Amino acid sequence: MIPHASHCLGCSAVFFPPRLRCHHCGGMAFEAHPIGAARVAAVTRVHRAPPGCEHTHLVELESTGGLRLLAAAGFSPAIGSFVHPVQSDDGAIVLTKT
Amino acid sequence: MSAALIHGAVEVAYTRRSTDTTAQWLTRAFDALLRQHDMSAEQIDGLGVASFTLRPDRCIDMAWRLGLRLSWSMDDGNGGVSGINLLQHAIAAIETGQARHIVLLAGDAFQAKDFADLVANYNRTTQQLLRPLGIANPNSLFALVTQRHMARHGLQRRDYGELVLAQRRHAALNPLAVYRGEMTMDDYLGAAPVADPLGIYDCVPVVAGADAILLSHADEVLDRAGCVRVRALGALHNFDRHEGDGLSTGLREIASSLYERAGLRPSDVDLACVYDDYPVMTLVQLEDLGLVPEGGLARFVREDLAAGRLALNTSGGQLSAGQAGCAGGMHGLVEAIRQLGGQCGSRQLARARTAVVSGYGMVEYRYGMCANAAILETFA
């Protein structure tokens, strides 16, 4: 599935990871909106991955509204390029080559 | 002037591996501290403990093991800010009559499983979003921070190496530092890669150990030689609500007020003990604390560090002395207290009257949320 950002129903604030209370308006009601394309802000190749882990790169992404999220990838995406992260059932946000 | 005096501090020799329990390490530090000050456990009526691995025990269980009767007790597991956090509360406790003699303990002895467990379960966000990635851990997170820091400040890998090497030169003079061997820039640049651009010498080495600090009400201390007082202390946690880039900390907002309260300028500081889990964060804090002028990091590492213009992490810091879990949050305080007290042997600074100590840590998702700092002064 597509990872979701948390949109405050009381104002326009957007959060990731989700919070429990909006610090802008005090609202506690949120709606999940899918995070579409995100820009690659930083990439690190991890040399000591745990056994069985197929990911080799940890990637920091920037999405609309200044949201930043972390994703794992089995390749090195170019900094500045736009990608479409997906979220596995276990919560992992990953990048796949398209 | 505050009624609370820092009477003294100890660090017991850290080791790379230990089969002793965390409680045993904390006991060792407690005992060494009492012996250093010729005090009996009966006199201690306050105890604060910072540890990840003492669990399921808490401060009160430690008090029971040590046979202490307490009017003040406090637990703190906030990693890199735990030492200054405990100090902040202990000063208030003494000033308001809650205790007369307080011992603050910090330490950890990880078994292999303990450390993996701590990294995987640091908080809920880690459990839900970082652990599933398989490769997200403090090393890879601060690799991303370092990469963006390099781009922001025009720094090269070797610039971070200058900091690591400078601290290793200090460690050579500290018999308690775990990693004291000479290191060259070639060693640093050629080190085994961990998460680009970080190699093993950028990542704080995990060791076992414990530290302890004694605070007393000034009226209880007849011989005040070697005593230290806190001129100013402040904290700002979650300052950017974790919506920033991790390239600054809450220290940026509180630094000027700290110096003002201490009646000092950054240039008056004789010693800086800046939290050093990764070189990038030490550089970030140096700028936040005003010890390096805005935009001056490249010049600082390339010229000032090599020339020894700032006494920085004179114990070798955690990068060379080792990080014994939560003791990492007390290590810099202990070094500053001992330098100001004139107890640092061959690495004793010729002039050590004022010190700035900072704490940093508690990664929520992408970087550390917590920051605090204290300005200490020799009791004259």
Image: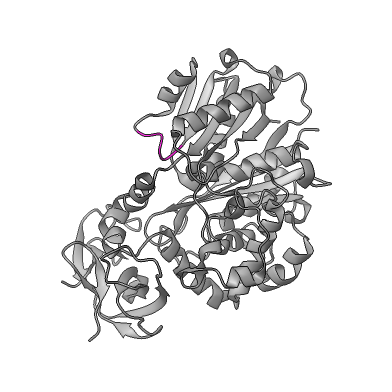
Q: Residue at 31%, 49% (x, y): give it.
A: B121
- The relative height of residue A36 versus residue B7 in the rendered view (above or below) is below
Please report the bounds of the magenta region as a residue range.
B51-55
Relative to A23, is B298 above or below? below
Query: Could you say which is closer to the camera, residue A19 or residue B53?
Result: B53
Image quadrant where residue A95 sits: bottom left
Point out residue B250 in the picture as x, y percentages from the top left corner: 53, 55
Residue projecting furthest to the top? B42
Query: Could you say where residue B176 lies in the image, as x and y percent from the top left?
Result: 64, 43
> Where does residue B244 sit, x and y in percent of width and height?
44, 65
Residue B70 in view, yes or no: no
Which residue corresponds to the image point at 74% horizontal and 53% vertical from the top-left?
A: B265
Residue B76: which quarter of the image?
top left
The majority secondary structure of the magenta stretch comes to: loop
Near-viewer residue (B5 or B304): B304
At 45% from the left and 54% from the top, the residue drawn is B369
Q: Is residue B86 left or right of residue A59?
A: right
Q: Quadrant of the C terminus of chain A?
A: bottom left
Q: Indicate left or right for B303 with B126 as reference.
A: right
Is A26 colored magenta in this rendering? Answer: no
